[in-house]
Amino acid sequence: MRTQVCIIGGGPSGLLLGKLLRNQGIDVQILERKTRDYVLGRIRAGVLEVGFVELMRLAGIAERMDKEGFTHAGTSISLNDEIFHVDFVEHTGTPVVVYGQTELTRDLYDALEADGADIHFNVDDVVIHDAKSDSPSVTYTKDGVTQRIGCDYIAGCDGFHGVSRQTIPTTVRREYEKLYPFGWLGVLSETPPVHHELIYSCSDRGFALCSMRNANLSRYYIQCSLSDSPDDWSDAAFWQELKRRIPEQFADTIVTGPSIEKSIAPLRSFVCEPMQWGRLFLCGDAAHIVPPTGAKGLNTAASDIHYLYYALLQHFKDKDSSGLEAYSAKALARIWKAERFSWSTTMMLHRFPEMNDFDLKMQVADIHFLRDNAAAQKVFAQNYVGVPY
Ligand code: FAS
Ligand code: PHB
């Protein structure tokens, strides 16, 4: 088999890049380790920056997002029973869109399969060969048979646990990592959201987040111990703890119900440099991870895809490879800004085991400064809606 771009990974990064390239007549093959249903079963991001929304429009798959997505002009932040609002539109002129990763991934799969894209599911033993040569290839096994795809370029969109990043020699790649001493226990429930926008809560008992997917599908998180497992938390225990962390006015009105999904995500900050090795280009979680506090994970994958898509287009259409040569530096410049925002909001809103009384005072001062200072809210809003591509 031969293609122009072999995409490893059928998550949002790989699918969005594949759709954009195919729209321009550039041939792609997409390799996914799991099944479509397995990929769609992972409950992840919920908030889209305008950059992601515009890429979905460019890809021609924004119809359902435009119809079902919620436009949010801001968010609320609470400290125990105090609550204040940060207005994104007032400070930046830009809202965000709430539309679940599951739904946009479904839209991508539907569109790619409708136009006959080559997506290979349940592949094993993916290996990247000769990435530093002019004729790289990818081998994989499916149903016990080994296949080889010759290609011009490889997009490593296979997430944090994929093979692409590992293909870059340890003598070449440098990894930066910070692990956080807690996770997020997330619950999806078929209940109306407690508020019309998100509520990020810092409380004496720890962090909580009230989010949503639609008018009758809510997504809630509480900071939890890394030693917890979802089975340690009954629905009743989750709701009770969440109510103790959000302002009383919302604890009294929240509609609870059975969890239809319950999972724990560990929090990590991670960046791999460079994001390119020869004709291999890393995108999304394959290259970087953020704690979800700033809603940057999926949105930083989007800017990688934006840069790589236009660089590949420039190469295949204009025989100009300058965009490809500049990809890693350009993507990393924006990634580090997202890493900083995600780290800083995580530090501001979570209770760390080792915090002493002075640390707690600093955290309260941090939140109060954001509450009281328009310039601080403008900076927060500019980061949350997404810095320019
Ligand atoms: P993904 O990990 O989504 O996709 C990679 C794909 O590659 C997967 O389908 C995988 O099966 C496949 N793959 C892996 N190895 C392979 C191989 N060897 N061969 C072929 N295929 C292979 N972001 C937010 O903004 N908000 C959140 O609340 C949030 N919650 C998250 C919770 C969890 C548990 C995780 C892990 C991430 C969360 N994220 C969140 C971040 C998440 O949304 C990612 O940013 C997003 O999934 C990135 O998409 P991809 O880069 O496509 O990586
Ligand atoms: C979500 O809805 O899953 C979500 C929203 C905002 C975040 C993290 C997760 O910062």
Image: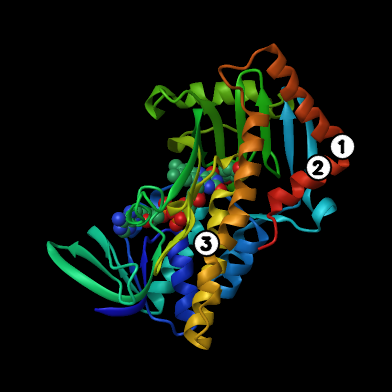
Find out whether the residues at labels 2 and 1 contact each other: C-beta distance under 8 Å.
yes
Residue 227 position (above or below residue 83):
above
**Residue 161: % across, % down:** 36, 47
Q: Ligand 2 lies in which image quarter?
A: top right
Residue 56 position (above or below residue 355):
below
User: Is 205 placed left or right of 88 in the picture?
Assistant: left
User: Is 152 placed left or right of 252 in the picture?
Assistant: left
Q: Residue furthest front?
A: 171
Q: Which residue type does callout 1 highlight? A: Asn
Find out whether the residues at labels 1 and 3 contact each other: C-beta distance under 8 Å.
no
Residue 168 position (above or below residue 181):
below
Q: Residue at x 61, y 30 (%)?
A: 208
* Front residue (pair 76, 22): 22
Q: Quadrant of the C terminus?
A: bottom right
Q: Residue at x 56, y 21 (%)?
A: 240
User: Is 188 placed left or right of 299 in the picture?
Assistant: left
User: Is 374 placed left or right of 38 in the picture?
Assistant: right
Mark found first going from the N terminus, 2 or 3: 3
Q: Which residue is mark 2?
A: 377
Q: Which residue type does callout 3 highlight? A: Ser
Q: Secondary structure at mark 3?
A: helix
* Front residue (pair 358, 25): 358
Q: Residue furthest left?
A: 144
Q: Which residue is mark 3?
A: 328
| Labelled disc at residue 168 | none
Q: Which residue is mark 1?
A: 373
